[in-house]
Amino acid sequence: MKRKTFFDSRDKYLSFVNSTNEKSKIAFYLFKKIEKISTRSPIFNVLDAGTGEGTIISTFLSGLHKYLPNKPIFVVGKEISIDDINVLLSFLGDRFAEHKTLIFNITNCSYKDINNSTSENVKFEKLELVGKKGIDFTKILMSLSPYIRKNWKLSFNNKNGSIKPKSKIFLTIYRKDQKKKLKDFIPRNISEIPKKYDFIIASQCFKLRSPLTQTVKNVIRPLLSLLNFKGKMFLIYSSGKDFTGSFLKYYYPRNGFYKNSEPKKLISQIKKNIEKDKFKIKLEKLKYTFNNLSINLKEFSLNNIFSVWNAINYVGQVSEIEQKKVSFTKKNINILQKRLSKLKNIYFEDNIVNFEKESL
């Protein structure tokens, strides 16, 4: 599957985010893991491997503030979507008001760049927030849209469908009235970005149909190399062990959407590519549903049907090209409604692979 064809499906993503409670469910799941983490260092480092529109990281930071109200928190949030960054920024004003010593870095750099002190051509810029209240910070952050649009431009490779940023950038944001207190932690170049993190969030950060060897090599192993001693990483992805699996098989019978989603195979491949006994690995499941609790399995409105259809295609990472092969005719709408009405309930399921680094 070409990366371009999936991630360009902006309408499917927004429909999924707005119609399901996956993002908030993940955030509260992560919140429960905070109290067991080590907090010995003078600053707590968090890496979000793909912020999306920011619901997970902004909610998580509010929970983190409860346990670490006075400790500086350093966040690196990787994201290439201009639209997602703009929404994320609209959430962060309240986080800076709540947690004064927050340093939030937004970047389009790769995991390899973050882990490499000698990476070249990385542009570093700082934004000092002036004010005292969340609304002061929100106003400044939401005015960044032209800046984000200019600096987060992408280049597309039509041959292999890959997407890369035209220029690499780190935008560091912090409160101006906290500058003196945070001076030792505010980065000036790539070499000063932390190389180890206490908490790594990796939600829906790889292609489900990519070979496991490729996923481990390009995504999981580089992220695990950034994990601090006693640090935790959470790899979250669609399991296919819910109603979406059978629906995708019905509408796209020749495509193996979840063929590499089996967690045992993934974990086995990970263990082959990391040092033995270095990580404690635990598998958990997370179920989530639609936000619209008025959905009636027997009487779907047309709007609800479209929401379900978009959600099915999003969690299965169905490309735009593949979706165009299924015409959404009245007949297909009726078929979808009948299939849905046969379900006792509608829920989605994610796999969560929990890593804890046990040795240096």
Image: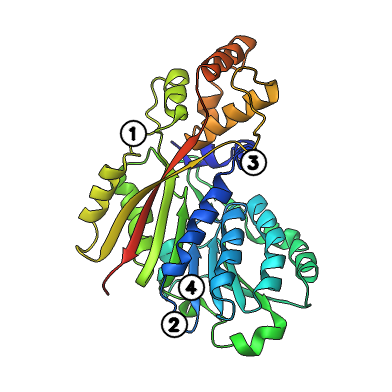
Q: For numbered disc 2, what is the local secondary structure?
A: loop
- Residue extending farthest to the bottom is 180
Q: In the picture, residue 272 is in which quadrant? A: bottom left
**Quarter the N terminus occupies:** top left
Q: Tell me which residue sits at (61%, 61%) in the image.
A: 58
Q: Nearer the viewer, residue 67 or 212?
A: 67
Marks 1 and 2 close (CB-CB < 8 Å): no
Q: Is residue 7 above or below residue 324?
A: below
| Residue labelled with disc 3 | 14
Q: Residues within 10 Å of mark 2 (few under 14, many from 20)?
A: few
The circle drawn on residue 41 is: 2
Distance from Cα at disc 1 to Cα at disc 3: 25 Å
Distance from Cα at disc 1 to Cα at disc 4: 34 Å
Distance from Cα at disc 3 to Cα at disc 2: 38 Å
The circle drawn on residue 45 is: 4
Q: Tell me which residue sits at (38%, 34%) in the image.
A: 258
Q: Tell me which residue sits at (56%, 79%) in the image.
A: 72
Amino acid, disc 2: Ser
Amino acid, disc 3: Leu
- Residue extending farthest to the top is 331
Marks 4 and 2 close (CB-CB < 8 Å): yes
| Residue labelled with disc 1 | 259
